[in-house]
Amino acid sequence: MAYLIGVRVKINRAKKYFADLNQAIKAFESREPHAAVMEIDPQSGYELYRFREREAIPLEWGAIVRDCIHNLRSALDLLGNDLVRHGGGTPSDYCAFPVGSSQRISERAPSRGSTVPAQRRSNWSNDSSLTTEGTIPSIVSTVSISPINICC
């Protein structure tokens, strides 16, 4: 079975979205959509610098950024599933990249020491990180999220 194919597809698609966004930004900037204008205030005589918008930033850019981020997040989920499969296991509901605050993640995840159905427990038969038969490893409650560098 070929692993990481879906991960590569999602990352390549995110790179395509990112390249499309960069191209759109360059085209937008070439039209000089904004200007800084200096005016003299007739009452005070002070120089006033004003920012003039000639053309609004396209709303579509938000959708492009969202699609890029979604594909990268999906790649992380697929990576987690592929790693479990590569290790001989079967992916479950707990095999996904956590998104959200640490508090929300730990509320959704099973607590340390909680019991797990026998079907899921069988996937951990060789997992030395389990302290007691059929309990969740402590790593579940210590997940942290860091920024993703999409220039890979």
Image (cartoon, rainbow, N blue to C red):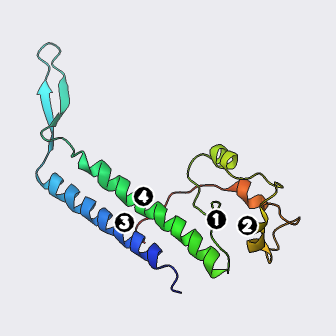
Q: Residues within 10 Å of mark 4 (few under 14, many from 20)?
A: some
| CA distance for labels 4 and 2 | 28 Å
Q: Position of residue 73 (x, y in %)?
A: 48, 61
Mark closer to the chain start, 3 or 2 = 3
Numbered disc 2: secondary structure: helix
Mark closer to the chain start, 4 or 1 = 4
Mark closer to the chain start, 4 or 2 = 4
| CA distance for labels 4 and 1 | 21 Å
Question: Are circles 2 and 1 on residues that touch, CB within 8 Å?
Answer: yes
Seen at 20% across and 58% down, the residue is 24
| CA distance for labels 4 and 3 | 8 Å
Give 49 or 87, whichever is nearer the viewer.
87
Q: Residues within 10 Å of mark 3 (few under 14, many from 20)?
A: many
> Label for residue 120?
2
Whether residue 6 sits left or right of residue 106 in the image: it is left
Dot 2 amino acid type: Arg
Q: Which residue is identified by label 3? A: 14
Numbered disc 4: secondary structure: helix
Q: Which residue is identified by label 4? A: 70
> Label for residue 92?
1
Dot 4 amino acid type: His
Seen at 64% across and 74% down, the residue is 84
